[in-house]
């Protein structure tokens, strides 16, 4: 009887140790998959959004891809403000260059934009409208000049209705610090 009980206990211990080792391997695999399946896309007119995208890349290890309009925006502040207003009012989506990465290869896509006229910049609108995000996770972030994200994140949801949209991150110009960005990324439970 003691022998049977001892064999039974040893067998249970072997199974438990095996399950523990398996869970550790799966956890490592999940971490690796997350790192390899993150894409950080962004449009940046003045460099502010690019700076935030680079912080996100450093924290996540994801791939970086810039959204670039085929026709560059004017360099004068008033000119770009006027053009951005016209694009918003007329629902213009400017042509963008192909990304250096394929959205299909990623599960989690960070999408960054400056806030123009209370929403995302038009090149980001084009990017969202021209890609299929079904079954993907979109993580929005934006930079602004003092007005906050306004309708940026809700407008992104409208353009990617079949994606899971996580809570966005908004920062004044380049003031995003790594500690705040890291706290936000951890809260996303990716």
Image (cartoon, helix red, strand yellow):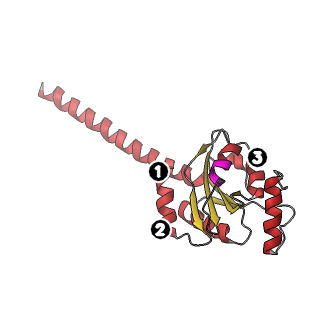
Position in image of residue 3 (x %, y %): 15, 29
Mark 1 / mark 2, whichever is N-terminal? 1
Spatial CA span between label 1 and label 2: 24 Å
Question: On the image, which quarter does residue 42 sit in?
Answer: bottom right
Instruction: Identify the residue at horizontal 74%, vertical 68% (top origin).
Output: 45
- Tag 2, which secondary structure? helix
The tag on residue 179 is: 2
Spatial CA span between label 3 and label 1: 35 Å
Mark 3 / mark 1, whichever is N-terminal? 1
Q: Residue furthest right?
A: 71
Spatial CA span between label 2 and label 3: 32 Å
Quarter that holds the N terminus = top left
Position in image of residue 125 (x %, y %): 75, 52
Task: Report the magenta stretch's main SS.
Answer: helix
Between residue 135 and residue 117, name the one nearer to us: 117
The residue that label 1 is drawn on is: 28
Position in image of residue 31 (x %, y %): 50, 52
Instruction: Identify the residue at horizontal 58%, vertical 66% (top origin).
Output: 171
Between residue 15 and residue 77, name the one nearer to us: 77
Of tags 1 and 2, the one toward the viewer is 2
From the viewer's perspective, is residue 67 above or below residue 146? Answer: above
Q: How many marks?
A: 3
Instruction: Identify the residue at horizontal 71%, vertical 49% (top origin).
Output: 103
Q: What's the magenta region?
A: 152-156
């Amino acid at each position: 009887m003691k022998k049977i009980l001892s064999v039974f206990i040893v067998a249970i211990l072997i199974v438990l140790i095996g399950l523990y080792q398996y869970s550790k391997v799966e956890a490592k695999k999940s971490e690796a998959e997350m790192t390899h399946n993150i894409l950080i896309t962004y449009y940046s007119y003045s460099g502010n959004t690019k700076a935030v995208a680079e912080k996100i890349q450093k924290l996540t290890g994801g791939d970086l891809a810039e959204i670039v309009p085929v026709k560059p925006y004017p360099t004068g502040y008033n000119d770009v403000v006027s053009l951005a207003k016209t694009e918003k009012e007329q629902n213009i989506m400017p042509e963008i260059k192909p990304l250096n990465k394929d959205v299909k290869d990623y599960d989690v896509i960070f999408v960054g934009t400056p806030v123009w006229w209370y929403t995302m910049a038009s090149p980001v609108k084009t990017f969202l409208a021209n890609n299929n995000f079904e079954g993907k996770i979109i993580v929005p972030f934006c930079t602004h000049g003092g007005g906050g994200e306004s309708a940026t994140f809700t407008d992104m949801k409208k353009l990617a209705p079949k994606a899971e949209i996580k809570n966005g991150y908004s920062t004044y110009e380049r003031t995003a610090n790594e500690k705040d960005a890291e706290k936000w990324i951890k809260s996303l439970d990716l």
